[in-house]
Image: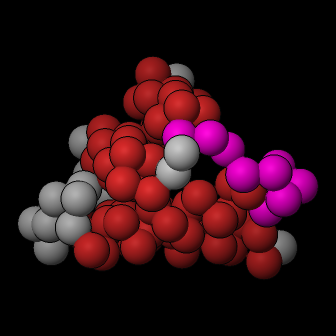
């Protein structure tokens, strides 16, 4: 239960950053991306995704409507915002 609740909190953090007019590279969006990275690592049994995998996952959130719907509850472009934040996070932080 806590795992799914954290997913919702992360989605809400991305939406809040976008609602505030902040970009995907903002501190707030990047904090959400860091939480998302940690959440994914937990879901992958502690195996953290590489920069390429994390970036590709963001692309999938846009391309696959089953995933996109999780990030477009507040903004129609929410999935793109999350994708861009994930890409920036990967470029700045991961291998």
Residue 27 x/y as whole percent: 27, 74
* Image vertical order of residue 43 relative to residue 4, above or below: above
| Residue furthest front as drawn | 95
The residues colored magenta run: 42-51
- Residues 95 and 20: in front is 95
Q: Quadrant of residue 39?
A: bottom right
Above or below: residue 92 compared with residue 26: above
Residue 54: say if magenta.
Answer: no
What residue sits 32% from the left and 66% below the top? 29
Q: Residue furthest top?
A: 63
Look at the picture and state if 37 lies above or below 69.
below
In the displayed structure, would residue 60 be above or below residue 41? Answer: above
Taking the magenta stretch, the answer to whether it contains residue 45 is yes
Residue at figure coordinates x 77%, y 69% from the top left = 3
Quadrant assignment for the C terminus: top right
Residue 44: x %, y % from top left: 82, 49
Q: Which image quadrant for residue 21?
A: bottom left
Nearer to me, 69 or 56: 56
Residue 16 coordinates in the image, percent (x, y): 29, 73
Q: Quadrant of residue 28?
A: bottom left
Visible residue check, residue 72: no
Q: Considering the image in quadrants, where does the N terminus appear? A: bottom right
Would you say 76 lies left or right of 32 here?
left
Number of numbered discs visible in the structure rendering: 0
The main secondary structure of the magenta stretch is loop
18 to the left or right of 78: left
Q: Is residue 9 visible?
A: yes
């Amino acid at each position: 239960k806590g795992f799914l609740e954290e997913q919702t909190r992360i989605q809400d953090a991305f939406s809040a950053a976008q609602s505030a007019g902040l970009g995907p590279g903002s501190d707030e969006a990047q904090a959400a991306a860091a939480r998302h990275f940690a959440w994914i690592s937990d879901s992958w049994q502690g195996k953290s995704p590489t920069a390429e995998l994390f970036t590709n996952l963001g692309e999938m959130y846009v391309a696959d409507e089953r995933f996109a719907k999780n990030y477009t509850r507040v903004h129609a472009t929410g999935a793109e915002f999350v994708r861009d934040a994930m890409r920036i996070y990967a470029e700045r932080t991961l291998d």
